[in-house]
Image: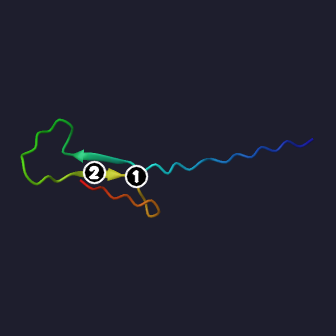
Amino acid sequence: MTNSVFVQAQQDNTIGVKIISPITGQQVPVGELTISGTSTDNSTTDCTVYA
């Protein structure tokens, strides 16, 4: 008797963005704001952020 088990993992296609600057709670002056961060995108899951 032969038992076979097949497992298929689902790929997580969730795209995430983490803002690292300004930091949480930091007060910023009125005017132009520069936001810096990181994202989980790659060459096949391009991520664009609009603010």
Q: Which residue is mark 2?
A: 37
Please give the name of the residue rendered at 44% of the width and 64% of the height, measured from the top-left corner. Answer: 43
Specify the label residue 31 is tagged with. Answer: none
Residue 30, compared with residue 48, is above or below; it is: above
Q: Is residue 22 left or right of residue 16?
A: left
31 vs 26, nearest the viewer: 31
State the image quarter where residue 45 is shown: bottom left
Between the C-alphas of marks 1 and 2, the distance is 11 Å
The amino acid beneath tag 2 is Gly
Q: Which residue is mark 1?
A: 40
User: Which residue is most to the top?
Assistant: 25
Please give the name of the residue rendered at 25% of the width and 46% of the height, measured from the top-left corner. Answer: 20
Horizontal and vertical percent for residue 1? 93, 41
* Callout 2: SS: strand
Horizontal and vertical percent for residue 15? 42, 51
For mark 1, does the 10 Å Cα neighbourhood hold few (<14), some (14 to 19), or many (20 or more) residues?
Answer: few
